[in-house]
Image: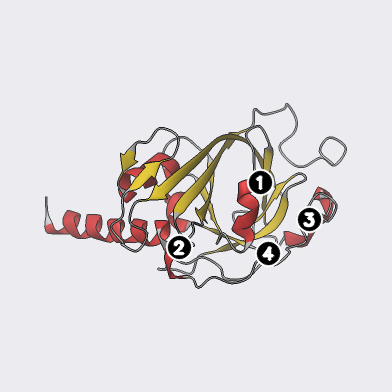
């Protein structure tokens, strides 16, 4: 392996660990209501209008009917471990975008608390700055235990299959591959806010002829 390749791999591993362990460095804070519940959610038309900024290529919001309606912010350049500490928004994971996918990060005591309410079969709508909407359907929910939550080198155990994998293997599993959206937050345990990791994965919804943008008459 060349020095350049080794340096790149080392940097990549460090970034992956930062992203997967970001909750470790957040002090617990009381959960607060985000105003997102079936009764409190804005209509999709209202939400789409509120988050637009005319930037066609920038993700501005994520909407799951009857579950959540959250603005999306981007990570600062060069800070792949950044996750917003503000209530009521999620952070787009820049490294996932390098592989053609969408990663949405949130702390579990803030907007990430809504990720546990997501279920297989629910529709996910991504809103871009110019109002374009991309549709997905939740296909998979994965939960992992961090075997050593206080270590940046922790391995992770799949709570369903009992399989153990490294942080890099877990990253590849949830962020690489065909186009998809991955919601990521931590799972709190008795002694650690970052006891485990929750990943909710949504795949593209089959296209409906003539529907490339939101139509309020079809999707209220």
SS at circle 4:
loop
- Please report whichever mark, 3 or 1, sits nearer to the chain's N-terminal start: 3
Q: In which quarter of the image is the C terminus?
A: top right
The circle on residue 191 is 2
Give the residue at mark 3: 47
In this rendering, the label closer to the viewer, 1 or 4: 1
Q: Is residue 130 visible to the viewer in this orientation of the structure?
A: no
**Foreground: disc 3 or disc 1:** 1
Give the class, few, some or many, for how many residues have Cα within 10 Å of label 1's Cα (few <14, many ≥20): few
Cα distance between the residues tagged 1 and 4: 15 Å
User: Which residue in the structure is indicated by mark 4?
Assistant: 88
Residue 210 figure quarter = top right
Q: Distance from label 4 to label 3 (Cα)?
A: 13 Å
Closer to the camera: disc 2 or disc 4?
2
In this rendering, the answer to whether 189 lies above or below 176 is below
Q: Given contact means CB atoms under 8 Å apart, are the residues at marks 2 and 1 in contact?
A: no
The residue most toward the right is 217
Visible in this render: residue 48? yes
Q: Which of marks 3 and 2 is in front?
A: 2
Residue 140 percent across, percent down from the top left:
54, 35
The earlier-in-sequence mark between 3 and 2 is 3
Disc 2 and disc 1: Cα gap in Å? 23 Å
Rendered position, 132 above or below 148 = above
Q: How many labels does the image show?
A: 4
- Residue 172 location, x and y as percent? 37, 43
Q: Which residue is drawn at 46% across and 59% down?
A: 194
* Crowd tier of the residue under label 4, counting other residues whose Cα lies within 10 Å: few below 14, some 14–19, many 20 or above: many
Q: Residues within 10 Å of mark 2 (few under 14, many from 20)?
A: few
**Is the residue under label 2 in contact with that under label 3 (CB below 8 Å)?**
no
Q: Which mark is residue 117?
A: 1
Q: Is mark 1 on a helix, strand or loop?
A: helix
Question: Left or right of 128: which side holds 50?
Answer: right
């Amino acid at each position: 392996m060349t020095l350049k390749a080794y340096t790149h791999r080392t940097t990549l591993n460090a970034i992956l660990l930062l992203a997967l362990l970001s909750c470790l460095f957040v002090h617990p804070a009381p959960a607060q209501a985000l105003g997102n519940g079936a009764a409190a959610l804005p209509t999709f038309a209202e939400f789409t209008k509120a988050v637009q900024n005319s930037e066609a290529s920038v993700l501005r919001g994520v909407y799951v009917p009857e579950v959540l309606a959250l603005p999306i912010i981007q990570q600062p350049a060069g800070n792949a471990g950044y996750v917003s500490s503000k209530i009521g928004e999620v952070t787009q994971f820049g490294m996932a975008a390098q592989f053609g996918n969408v990663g949405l990060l949130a702390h579990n005591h803030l907007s990430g608390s809504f990720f546990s309410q997501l279920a297989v079969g629910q529709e996910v709508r991504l809103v871009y700055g110019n109002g374009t909407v991309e549709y997905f359907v939740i296909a998979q929910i994965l939960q992992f235990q961090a075997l050593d939550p206080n270590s940046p080198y922790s391995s992770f155990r799949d709570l369903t299959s009992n399989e153990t994998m490294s942080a890099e293997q877990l990253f590849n599993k949830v962020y690489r591959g065909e186009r998809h959206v991955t919601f990521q937050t931590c799972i709190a345990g008795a002694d650690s806010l970052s006891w485990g990791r929750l990943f909710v994965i949504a795949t593209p919804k089959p296209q409906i002829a003539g529907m490339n943008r939101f139509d309020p008459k079809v999707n209220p």
